[in-house]
Structures are given as C-alpha cells and as structure tokens.
Image (tube, grey):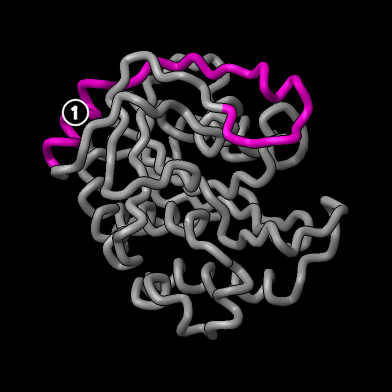
Amino acid sequence: MKMPVLFVGHGSPMNAIEQNRFTETLSGLAQRLPRPKAVCVVSAHWVTRGSEVLTVAKPRTIHDFYGFPAPLYQMEYPAPGAPTEAKRVAGELKIKPDETWGFDHGGWSVLCHLYPEADIPVFQVSLDDGRSLAGHIELGAELARLRNRGVLILGSGNIVHNLRRLEGDKDAEPYPWTVEFDSKVKNALEIRDVTSLAAPEHWGKPLAALAHPTLEHYVPLLYCMGSTTERDAVSYPYEGFEYGSLSMRMVLFGGENESAPHSI
C-alpha cells in the first residue's frame, strides 16, 4: 500500500507530556492510517550544511529545549532506527549518512502520541540550510519513492511560527497575520500552487517575515508537498492556533486505512 504523507504543526515541547485536543488527535490519527514499516521524519530541529540522513541503529532521544519542567527531560523515545532504509536513501539521493544525531523533539514529541509503543523504526532527514525553498520541494519529490516501500513521511514544523510574538496565554486570539498566512498556505495546498509555496514572499514580504522570522519550521511542509501528487487528497486532521503566533495545523496527504475508524 502506498503510504500517505503527514505534516504536523508540533508547537510547544510540552505537547509531549500533555493531554489535550491536539495530542488526542495525534493518538486517534494513528488508528486511521495504515501501519508503516518505518517513519522518515523531516524535522524543523535538524538543520545542517548539506542534506544528511540518520543511519543509527539505536538513535538517542535529544532534549533540544531549555527551561521546561523536569518530566519533559526525563522522556525517552526508544524506537529503533532504520539503518538499512536510511543508507538506501543516502545512496539514492546522494546525501550524507550521519551517525551523530538522534530523535530531536520535532520528531519524538509527535511520535510519542502517534506510536506510543515506540515499535516502528524511525530515521530522520535533515534540512539543508543552503538549499532554496524550491530545492527542498525537489528533494521531497525524491523522497516520494519511500511511500511505495511502506515508509510514512512525517514533516514536523509549524505553518506559522514566530516565537518573538508569542502571547503568554496558550488560548490567546491569533494575530490577523497568523490567520492570513495559515489561510494562504491552506489554499495553496488545496490547489497545488507549488510556485507560491516555494516563494511565500509573493504574498507580501512583511506577512512572510511575520509568519516566519526564520524558515526552518516552514520547510518540512515543502518536503511533504514535494513527495505528493495531485492524486493525493488533502485533509486537515487538526486546525487551530496557540499563543497568538503559532499555527498548529496538521495536513494529511493521501488516503486513510479503510478498515480503521474515521472519527477522532
């Protein structure tokens, strides 16, 4: 079965240990999707010079954040790596194998709800900070072959991510520009406007700069888009905003497991 592709707006690391509507959606979503042989994570939190792929057999859990409660630092996600598949990807895409990284929180804070048993092999592909936005989409198209090998491609970032403008209240009203940028991206996804997704400044440079002072949380969505075609239906398992300046939208490309329940 050709696997779907999932983008998750992961938000605060605290979602790893909290139970809320967002995390409950993640938990329910796993029951709706075909079970993957492995998961390929493209996370906002692994940025490198040149693309890399994690080939470690037993990846470590990386606590790449500061100032959070102790229970968050005690969390481990002991899923096995997928070194055979990862090395195959390195060869096919001509990207560098890496044995020093692990699972950053962009990956494990989502996976701990999707697959809490940590029994599915996982590997990560980094974000090349020298690649153009169009180049990230092109590499996503190269990753598309994984879908026919039973691999779930999971992008983890946020469609709007501006930590400089965070409100203190998680349920604060989103800024108008937060809603506007999220809406423009949603529309572009639905009509497969890859040109606009690869050049969001065309929607207005001030708007793009407000939505993403830096682009690492936007880029994982481009890998997801690149790995899909017009035949993949687009749906949104979760929509919402947090702290005024974060979009928590999830985007699912492709079909669901027909034998699984369709409600969350």
Residue 230, image x, y percentages:
31, 63
Nearer-the-camera pick, 228 or 12: 12
Question: From the viewer's perspective, is 237 left or right of 41?
Answer: right
Q: Amino acid at mark 1?
A: Lys
- At 74% from the left and 76% from the top, the residue drawn is 176
In the rendered image of this protein, does residue 178 appear above or below residue 229?
below
Nearer-the-camera pick, 195 or 259: 195
Task: Decide if residue 121 is in sight here.
Answer: yes
Question: In the picture, which quadrant includes the N terminus?
Answer: top left
Q: Assess disc 1: are there few (<14), some (14-19) or many (≥20) residues with their C-alpha within 10 Å of its C-alpha.
A: many
Question: In the picture, which quadrant includes the C terminus?
Answer: top right
Nearer-the-camera pick, 250 or 162: 162
Part of the protein shown in magenta: 63-92
Question: From the viewer's perspective, is 138 left or right of 225?
Answer: left
Residue 210, image x, y percentages:
63, 72
Task: Decide if residue 114 is in sight here.
Answer: no
Q: Is residue 68 magenta?
A: yes
Residue 227, image x, y percentages:
30, 52
Q: How many marks?
A: 1
- At 48% from the left and 47% from the top, the residue drawn is 44
- At 83% from the left and 65% from the top, the residue drawn is 173
Residue 168, image x, y percentages:
86, 54
What residue did someone put label 1 on?
87
